[in-house]
Image (cartoon, helix red, strand yellow):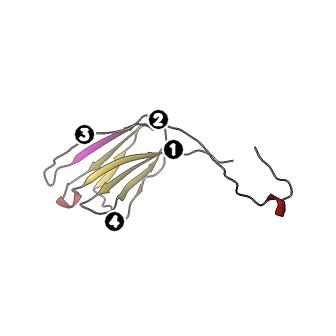
Amino acid sequence: DKQIASMNSTHLDRYVCKINNIYILQVNQSPPNIIVQQKQSVKINCHQSDTNNNMYWYRQQSSTELQLVVHSPYLSTPEYGHNIEDRFSITRSVVENITLQIENVQTSDTGFYLCATKWHSAVT
């Protein structure tokens, strides 16, 4: 710990604050590849190895940027991304799992779906 009570010109220097936090988290999606007929429904499951409250589903279509499908804070109302249709929904009965369901699948739903989680720590 370094504290400077009264800062003055003699304290001019470069200061580096370094925080190290190694945290290993595993996120598994299943099934890894899905082929679905139009108008069918599909479920994609995701499991995290910890109890992080915030889980996300993203999708990437063709060579576009990742698009947020849904952000799910555990035990709170999910927040769906911009232009995500009502055919998309999630189930999250336990903090470690989230399932994305797409009803009445359309060709426009084709893409790479990515599940993610975010670890939050309090800064005091």
Q: Which residue is mark 4?
A: 83
Nearest to N terminus: mark 4 or mark 3: 3
Report the disc number at residue 50.
2
How many discs appear?
A: 4
Q: Are marks 1 and 2 in contact (CB under 8 Å)?
A: yes
Q: Which residue is mark 3?
A: 31
Q: Residue furthest left?
A: 37
Q: Amino acid at mark 1?
A: Trp
Give the magenta part as a residue range: 40-52
- Is label 4 in a helix, a strand or a loop? loop
- Is label 2 in a helix, a strand or a loop? loop
Q: Tell me how far mark 2 sits from mark 3, CA to CA.
A: 20 Å
Q: Quadrant of the N terminus?
A: top right
Report the disc number at residue 119.
1
Report the disc number at residue 105.
none
Residue 49 part of the magenta-drawn span: yes
